[in-house]
Amino acid sequence: MAQEIELKLALAEHGWRSFSRHPALRDAVAAPRTQTLRNLYFDTADLALRRQRVALRLRRAGRVWLQTVKCASSARAGLSSRPEWEQPFSGHFDFSQIEDAALRGELEALRDRGALSTVFDTDFERREWRFNVGGGELLLMADRGHILAGGRRESISEIELELAGAPVEALLELAARLAETLPLRAESRSKAQRGYDLMAGAEPAPVRAGRSPIDPQGSAMDAFRAVTLDCVAHYQANEHGALHADAPEFIHQMRVALRRLRSALRVFAPALPAGAASTLATHLRALAGELGELRDRDVLQTELLAPVIAGEPDVALLDLERVLRSARAASRDRVLAALQDGRQARLMIALLSLLQQPDSDDAPSLRKLARRRLAGAHQRMIRAVRRARSGDIEALHALRIDVKRLRYALEFFLPLLDTEHVRQALDTLSEAQESLGFINDLSQAGPRLLAAAGDSDALLSAVSRIAAHHMPRYRAAVDAAPRLLRRLERLPPPL
């Protein structure tokens, strides 16, 4: 059995010319080998192998056929590691080399019943470069072709870096060199996963953040690794939908994932190498800026303008909507470019490099870190509450940020805490975040709406109608703010 460790990077179609001229390719030990590969993927009629996250593939390279079995991988930020069994194919499936007895027995039973058949196939040209680094080899494979499944077709345009004896650090270093100038995006889905998704024809659905994955018995760095990979998985689970569908929730969930990741860097900073958190924060800001702009425009249209139009549409409101839709379309175009221009890949590679770092000898224990960081976040929120008593909009906005940071920290450390006690605190913080968020959304919407209206009296009247429609809720939220502030101030320390 081989343990396949690889990094998959999607390459935008317009990037192939730049890739073929990239200086890093000159370091290869020889000219690239080029192959045309046809791959047939097999499963049962009810997709039993997919449910178990097993891939069974036949690959033809020239006149040679190879049989490959791959098991479930842990893929985050494009880097995956999974067991793999590969051998020549002699005309019938042979699973005798699979050490996992249960898997071997199941595959043999499916074969003997004649239950295995082709479910989809891939065809692509592969160019392969080899590098001698770190006492071993590193492979770089550039794949370009397509997936065919269920009468549907999807392009393959990606680069894979695979270890063949070289250290992981060498793989990440080469990936970072490529991502400096190429339009790359870390891809978490394998070709098999993409084939199954294409065959199903199912529309992607937004994915929310899950429970904290930290192990209470682990180190602070272990907890950071688990939380970081969870945030990355949350982001990437929504990225495919954002690229191929226009539902606002995908962008919202990606933005939440990046905010949680930024909070994780802040919370776990004492356990990280010096300067690591600030360096990664720069990469985060580069990617999050365009997402934030589009999310703000989505809120403006779906939560502030749409209810007014639904109640009593008129020409001015519809004209304003067209202006806002045009601005949103331009913002979405910028987001689509940002998601594929290398920013995402640079962030993911930097994160993976950090996650390879060993635990620091002087890092605090996980429980000690949790106590300190939660106490600090709680104190900052209390101070923000006292500043917000003035009713100043900027102070309320600052409080919303501190509420969110305390909430994320509590969610990260939840496995260490008294669940019932913390759940009540989280409910209060969530309610505060929603109420303060509405106040912030409406205050931020004014300048955007006025900019969209320009000098048009009709459009300015439409802006006035939107403000009048939401003013009762806005006043109610502002009137309820003192009571909300008292509840937040009475919130007991988490530990």
Image (spheres, helix red, strand yellow):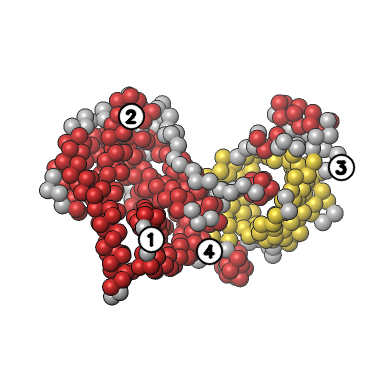
Q: Which residue is mark 4?
A: 183
Task: In the displayed orientation, state which residue is furthest to the bottom.
Answer: 455
The mark nearer the N terminus, 1 or 2, is 1
The mark nearer the N terminus, 3 or 1, is 3
Report, in whole angstroms, how far the alpha carbon at label 1 lies from the one at label 4.
Answer: 43 Å
Labels 3, 2: front one = 2
Question: In the displayed structure, would residue 383 be above or below residue 146?
Answer: above
Question: In the displayed structure, would residue 137 be above or below residue 181?
Answer: above
State whether residue 51 appears in this view: yes
Q: Residue at x 65, y 35 (%)?
A: 51
Task: In the displayed orientation, state which residue is furthest to the right.
Answer: 91
Q: Quadrant of the C terminus?
A: top left
Q: Which residue is mark 3?
A: 90
Report, in whole angstroms, how far the alpha carbon at label 3 lies from the one at label 1.
Answer: 69 Å
Q: Which residue is mark 2?
A: 423
Q: Between residues 436 and 226, which one lies in front from this camera angle?
A: 436
The mark nearer the N terminus, 1 or 4, is 4
What crowding class fits label 4: few (fewer than 14 Cα within 10 Å), some (14-19), or many (20 or more)?
A: many
Q: Residue at x 70, y 40 (%)?
A: 55
Q: Residue at x 66, y 46 (%)?
A: 200
- Secondary structure of the residue carrying tag 4 is loop
Question: Would you say the residues marked 3 and 1 are in contact, meaning their CB atoms lie under 8 Å apart?
Answer: no
> Residue 229 placed where, x, y %?
47, 42
Could you tell me the amino acid type at mark 4? Pro
